[in-house]
Amino acid sequence: MPLLLRRLPARPGPWPAGPSAKRVLDLAGAALLIGVLLVPLLLTAALLYATQGAGVLVREPAAGLAGRPYRAWRLRVGKGRAGAALERCALDRLPQLLNVVRGEMSLVGPRPGNSPSDRPERLLVRPGMTGLWQVSARSELPWEEMDLLDRHYVENHWLGMDLAILAQTPRAAWRHGRP
């Protein structure tokens, strides 16, 4: 089933078009989350630095909107129970809030791919920190179903869906972070 690109009509009036509601939500949400999570994130980074040494923050190559390459931030977590817990809860991905502020990512969208040829329909929207499959029984889904949920998001996303996904994300992270 091919994806259709819909063109929105130009905004009427003499004023320049402002940022979309999704972008405003991304900026406001990222600013709020950075403010709330800055101290715990810095403490986690300090603990990782104390146990692993330098290189706590790493940047991984990813394909963004329209296949534009960017480098996604994340915490370098080590092996062991603490590292596994950080990854299970996706806390190692919290530095991607910086990518959201920069406009390379969104709070909600398909997870970023490594290359533009990796499921090209995902390149029609900005990659997100959380998404539909992350709040839908994340690790229990086969890859095909994750792909279908990403495709559904790309074809049908709207601000209400983003708000619902954001509201479900903490519970999903908590559910998957427990041993």
Image (tube, rainbow, N blue to C red):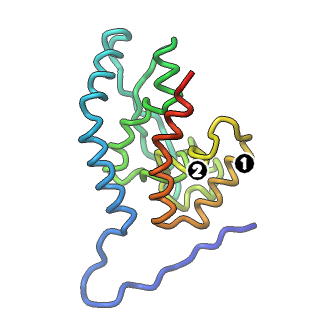
Report if residue 166 is visible in the image: yes
The amino acid type found where label 2 is placed reads: Pro
Q: Which sits in the foreground, 96 or 171?
A: 171
The answer to whether residue 176 is above or below residue 117 is above
Tell me if label 2 and label 1 are in contact, CB under 8 Å.
no
Q: Residue at x 74, y 40 (%)?
A: 142
Q: Residue at x 50, y 27 (%)?
A: 87
Report the quarter where the N terminus lies: bottom right
Mark 2 element type: loop
Which residue corresponds to mark 1? 145
Q: Position of residue 83 (x, y in %)?
A: 48, 18
Mark 2 to mark 1 CA distance (whole Å): 20 Å
Left-right relation of 76 to 114:
left
Badge 1 element: helix
Q: Which residue is mark 2?
A: 116
Q: Nearer the viewer, residue 145 or 17?
A: 145
Vertical order, 62 against 53 (above or below): below
Q: Which residue is pictured at 59% across the width and 59% down the height?
A: 153
| In the image, farthest residue toward the bottom | 13
Q: Earlier in the sequence, mark 2 or mark 1?
A: 2
Q: Nearer the viewer, residue 140 or 56?
A: 140
Q: x%, y% of residue 147? A: 68, 50
Quarter the C terminus occupies: top right
Where is residue 162? Give x, y as percent: 47, 59
